[in-house]
């Protein structure tokens, strides 16, 4: 039976990175290149009676995973993941942001990928235990945090195509600065005309590796054209804006409305997306989740109706978008300045996360 009473045993590393090495990494963390000393793990198995259960929750030294070469995840991509962050406040305490939302989304993704449900408490305990073991890795610089990457993989070895009966849930942590590197500045986006990220009835609303694998070729195309991210459209639905390779997108209109594409079943329901919607409502903005097309983006920028566009996600936080382009056209400008609304929502969100702005919605959880 699924238990929510799993305590994470501490099997701490005998060879953690030295303080000097850690400090050197924290001085310039980048994004996703360095990892802390530990990982949280909990395994799952379906027994002979068909009962599934989680067991052997532990914190162990960070390192390679031993997997059978026939492990299901390696062949059929039965995998899901999450992204959230731990923030250091001025008094030294460490907090995370809306982890219950990530736990719930993980379980929605698990349902779609035929993976087992993970009790919310186990998700929270994994994160808390890992961050406690690796507290010294939580950066304190402006815009910096410890990025947490929970993931669930099908570890059972077999080649028939079916849902695995052995699974592992893990969390790794990586000190993080700006996702796009360097100082925050508006990014350029490439329109993917040939490729979709997800289709109707597919896995677009789930946070699974396959969606990101599908974004890599168009992402290469974007980079070859000097762009930082790729924009996916619903080509069978008037080129409705879906999302970027790894983040959601928002539009600020001259009349004060704040618009993001409505969840279509193929868009990832971002935790940052939902937080921005709430902050917009708190400000009394006319917040809309609706269909917005490439034509509206083009004409809105040309007429001045759309005044700001930004990307948002846990990794990206809130990043202004300057230019949107493909082979035939350019909408906006790569030299654009970051918009006022964009930057003020970014500051408010980061302020809540880092404890300098009141947390009116009870989004923070102490680790
Ligand atoms: C996140 O924002 O946490 C993601 O998982 C997206 C990825 C671009 C890092």
Image (cartoon, rainbow, N blue to C red):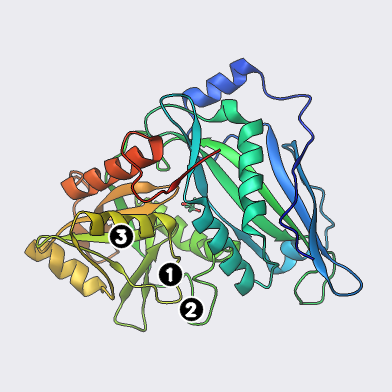
- N-terminal label among 1 and 2: 2
State which quarter of the image contains the C terminus: top right
Nearer-N-terminus badge (3/1): 1
Estimate how packed mark 2 is, as few (under 14), some (14 to 19) or many (20 or more) residues with alpha carbons within 10 Å. Answer: some
Which of the labelled discs sits on residue 277, or is there none?
3
Q: How far, Cα to Cα, is label 1 from label 2?
A: 10 Å
Where is residue 88 drawn, in percent x and y?
A: 46, 31
Q: How many numbered markers are drawn? A: 3
Which residue is painted at 76% across and 29% down in the image?
A: 13
* Residue at disc 1, secondary structure: loop
The disc at residue 267 is: 1
Whole-number angstrom distance, CA of label 3 to CA of label 1:
15 Å
Quadrant where the image shows the N terminus: bottom right
Question: Is tag 3's residue or tag 2's residue first in the polypeptide sequence?
Answer: 2
User: Which mark, residue 76?
Assistant: none
* Of residues 93 and 269, the one drawn nearer to the viewer in this rendering: 93
Q: Which residue is drawn at the image coordinates 52% and 41% (left, top)?
A: 147
From the viewer's perspective, is the residue at label 3 or at label 2 nearer? 3
Residue 295, quarter of picture: bottom left
Q: Looking at the picture, does residue 52 appear above or below residue 64?
A: below
Question: Quick check: 99 left or right of 316?
Answer: right
Label 3 – label 2 distance at C-alpha? 25 Å
Q: Where does the image place residue 300, in percent across and percent down from the top left?
A: 14, 66
Q: Is residue 125 visible?
A: yes
Q: Residues within 10 Å of mark 3 (few under 14, many from 20)?
A: many
Contact between marks 3 and 2 (CB within 8 A): the answer is no
Could you tell me which secondary element the residue under label 3 belongs to?
Answer: helix
Q: Position of residue 318 (x, y in %)?
A: 33, 48
Q: Nearer the viewer, residue 158 or 141?
A: 141
Above or below 124: residue 77: below
């Amino acid at each position: 039976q699924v238990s929510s009473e799993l305590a994470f045993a501490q099997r701490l590393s005998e060879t953690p990175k030295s303080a000097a090495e850690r400090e050197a990494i924290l001085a310039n963390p980048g994004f996703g290149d360095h990892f802390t000393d530990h990982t949280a793990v909990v395994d799952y198995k379906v027994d002979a009676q068909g009962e599934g259960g989680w067991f052997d929750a532990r914190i162990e030294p960070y390192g390679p995973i031993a997997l059978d070469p026939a492990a299901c995840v390696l062949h059929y991509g039965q995998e899901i993941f999450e992204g959230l962050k731990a923030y250091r406040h001025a008094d030294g305490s460490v907090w995370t942001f809306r982890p219950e939302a990530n736990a719930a989304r993980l379980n929605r993704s698990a349902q779609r990928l035929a993976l087992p449900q993970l009790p919310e408490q186990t998700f929270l305990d994994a994160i808390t235990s890992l961050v406690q073991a690796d507290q010294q890795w939580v950066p304190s610089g402006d815009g910096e945090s410890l990025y947490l990457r929970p993931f669930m993989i099908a570890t059972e070895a077999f080649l028939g195509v079916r849902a695995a009966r052995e699974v592992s849930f893990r969390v790794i942590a990586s000190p993080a600065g700006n996702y796009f590197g360097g100082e925050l500045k508006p990014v350029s986006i490439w329109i993917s005309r040939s490729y979709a990220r997800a289709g109707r009835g597919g896995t677009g609303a789930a946070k699974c590796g396959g969606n990101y694998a599908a974004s890599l070729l168009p992402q290469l195309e974007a980079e070859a054209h000097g762009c930082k991210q790729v924009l996916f459209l619903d080509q069978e639905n008037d080129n409705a804006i879906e999302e970027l390779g790894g983040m959601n997108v928002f539009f600020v209109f001259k009349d004060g409305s704040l618009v993001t594409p409505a969840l279509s079943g193929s868009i990832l329901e971002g935790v940052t997306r939902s937080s921005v919607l709430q902050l917009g409502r708190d400000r009394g903005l006319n917040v809309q989740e609706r269909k917005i097309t490439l034509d509206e983006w083009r004409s809105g920028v040309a007429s001045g109706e759309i005044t700001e566009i930004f990307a948002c996600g846990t990794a990206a936080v809130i990043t202004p978008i300057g230019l949107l382009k493909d082979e035939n056209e350019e909408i906006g400008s790569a030299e654009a300045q970051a918009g006022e609304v964009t930057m003020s929502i970014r500051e408010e969100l980061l302020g809540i996360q880092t404890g300098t702005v009141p947390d009116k919605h009870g989004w923070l959880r102490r680790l």
